[in-house]
Each structure stands twice: as C-alpha cells, then as structure tokens.
Amino acid sequence: MSMLKPRSTTDFDRNVPETRLWRAVIARTIQEWISGPLGRQREAEQYLFDDTRDFRRVCGSAGIDSGELRARLALLRGHAIPEYLLAAA
C-alpha cells in the first residue's frame, strides 16, 4: 500500500510538531471508526465521510489530501477489516 501523498511539498514538513499532531488526530479517528464503541464508531464515520469543512482543514494541516484519504477509507467501508489492521489500532 502506498503512502498518502502530501497536498503540497512546499507547504509540508512531516516533522513539524503540528503536522504530527493533526496526523495523530486523523489516526485516532480512524482507530475509533474501526474498533471503538458503537457510538464513537458512528461519530467517527460521520466525521470521516460526511464532514464538509473541518475534515478538509484537519487533513490539510496534516499534509494529507482529504479526497484521497476518503477514497481509500471508502474501500474499507462495509468490508471486514483485516485482523492485522485491528491489531495495529
């Protein structure tokens, strides 16, 4: 699986603390969507797939293309999550 490409190589530095923070926010939200309690799964899914404003900002701050991330997450949506991904969460 290839890494998600940064939105802009001129504006992005993966080692900036703020970038790492926003990537952690996204990772935590995905983790809750995959294996959190049902209420948190629903909140995370709504945010990951339906939020029209903040999701793009957070992804932008993390140096991640929000459309590409949503497309990749959509491939997992409705399918069984492989055990190795659940273990990583």
Image (cartoon, rainbow, N blue to C red):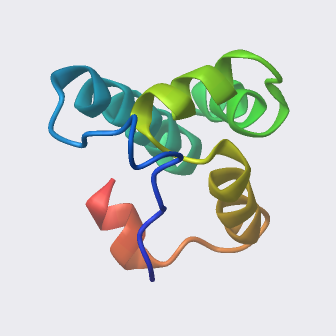
State the residue at coordinates (40%, 49%).
9
* Residue 17, quarter of picture: top left
* Residue 37, quarter of picture: top right
Q: Is residue 68 left or right of residue 78?
A: left
Query: As displayed, is residue 33 above or below residue 69?
Result: above
State the residue at coordinates (41%, 76%).
83
Q: Is residue 51 left or right of residue 84?
A: right
Q: Nearer the viewer, residue 8 or 77?
A: 8
Q: Nearer the viewer, residue 52 or 61?
A: 61
Count of residue discs: 0
Q: Is residue 57 left or right of residue 86?
A: right
Residue 33 point in image, percent of width and height: 58, 42
Residue 66 point in image, percent of width and height: 66, 43
Q: Residue furthest front?
A: 10
State the residue at coordinates (77%, 29%).
46
Residue 67 point in image, percent of width and height: 73, 50
Residue 76 point in image, percent of width and height: 68, 68
Image quadrant where one finds the N terminus: bottom left
Q: Is residue 14 left or right of residue 58?
A: left
Query: As displayed, is residue 10 above or below residue 39?
Result: below
* Residue 50, quarter of picture: top right
Q: Nearer the viewer, residue 46 or 64?
A: 64
